[in-house]
Image (cartoon, rainbow, N blue to C red):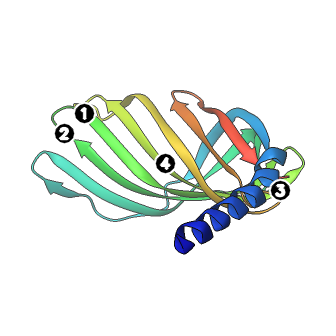
Amino acid sequence: MRNSISLSVVVTAIMAAAAPAAAGAATVPIAGTFAADSQGTCAEPTLQGSVYRWNCIGATERYAGDLTSTADAVFTVDGAFNAVSGATHLTGTERFVGCVGPRCGTLDWRYHTSIKGNPETLEPISANGRARITGGTGDLAGAKGTFAFTCTDPCTYEGRLVLRP
């Protein structure tokens, strides 16, 4: 019984300490555009069956709108292109450097993207994906949230961030 009482006291204390922080957090809608600056450095694609796989590091892009870049966002790409279906799947991480309104710092996120392409011309037909915020620094420390993105012309994003007080 002693352990269960101690555990309930600890859980209650943790919940009480977390409640004010969560209560003061601000949910901020975000929307805007982004454009790639560079593809970074990419490894030579490898063929596994009908799927080409590759990895790129140091690719960059810039954000406008509610996410406003003050420096290049740098990202990695792990890609897989199916030569039969024309489908491409990308995953990776990205570090955004900039501001959300008056609050500036960095945001880190993991993303996944699906691209439907023409298997004969390799031209993209449609692309969409999602990103999940995994951390931040400066005024954006403690940020959480997700956003969806679509790339036709231009690439757009839309979602929500939860910013600590």
Query: How many other residues sit within 10 Å of disc 4, few (<14), some (14-19) or many (≥20)?
Result: many
Is there any visible trace of residue 84 in the rendered image? yes
Judge from the rendering whether residue 62 lies leftward or rightward of residue 109; answer left or right. right
Say what amino acid the circle numbered 3 marks.
Cys
Q: Is residue 81 left or right of residue 70?
A: left
Instruction: Say whether disc 2 or disc 3 marks the residue closer to the N-terminus.
Output: 2
- Mark 4 or mark 2, whichever is nearer to me: 4
Q: In the image, residue 8 lies at what x, y percent? A: 61, 62
The amino acid pointed to by label 1 is Gly
Name the residue tied to disc 1: 86
Crowding near the residue tagged with mark 1, few <14, some 14–19, many ≥20 C-alpha atoms within 10 Å: some
Residue hosting label 2? 83
Amino acid tagged 4: Tyr
Looking at the rendered structure, the secondary structure element under dot 1 is loop
Mark 3 or mark 4: name the one nearer the start of the chain: 3
Q: Which mark is residue 132?
A: none
Residue identifier under label 4: 111
Q: Residue at 55% of width from left, 34% of height from top?
A: 149
Give the residue displayed 59% in from the left and 41% down from the top: 146
Of the residues tagged 2 and 3, which is closer to the observer? 3
State the CA–CA distance, disc 1 to disc 2. 5 Å
Q: Earlier in the sequence, mark 4 or mark 1?
A: 1
Of label 3 and label 1, which has the lower sequence position?
Answer: 1
Q: Quadrant of residue 33?
A: top right
Q: Horizontal and vertical percent for residue 137?
A: 74, 65
Q: Are marks 3 and 4 in contact (CB under 8 Å)?
A: no
Instruction: From the image, tell me which residue sits under label 3.
Output: 104
Label 1 near label 3: C-beta < 8 Å? no
Mark 2 or mark 4, which is nearer the start of the sequence? 2
Name the residue nearer the viewer: 13 or 32: 13
- At horizontal 22% and vertical 31% (from top left) the residue drawn is 120
C-beta proximity under 8 Å, tags 1 and 2: yes
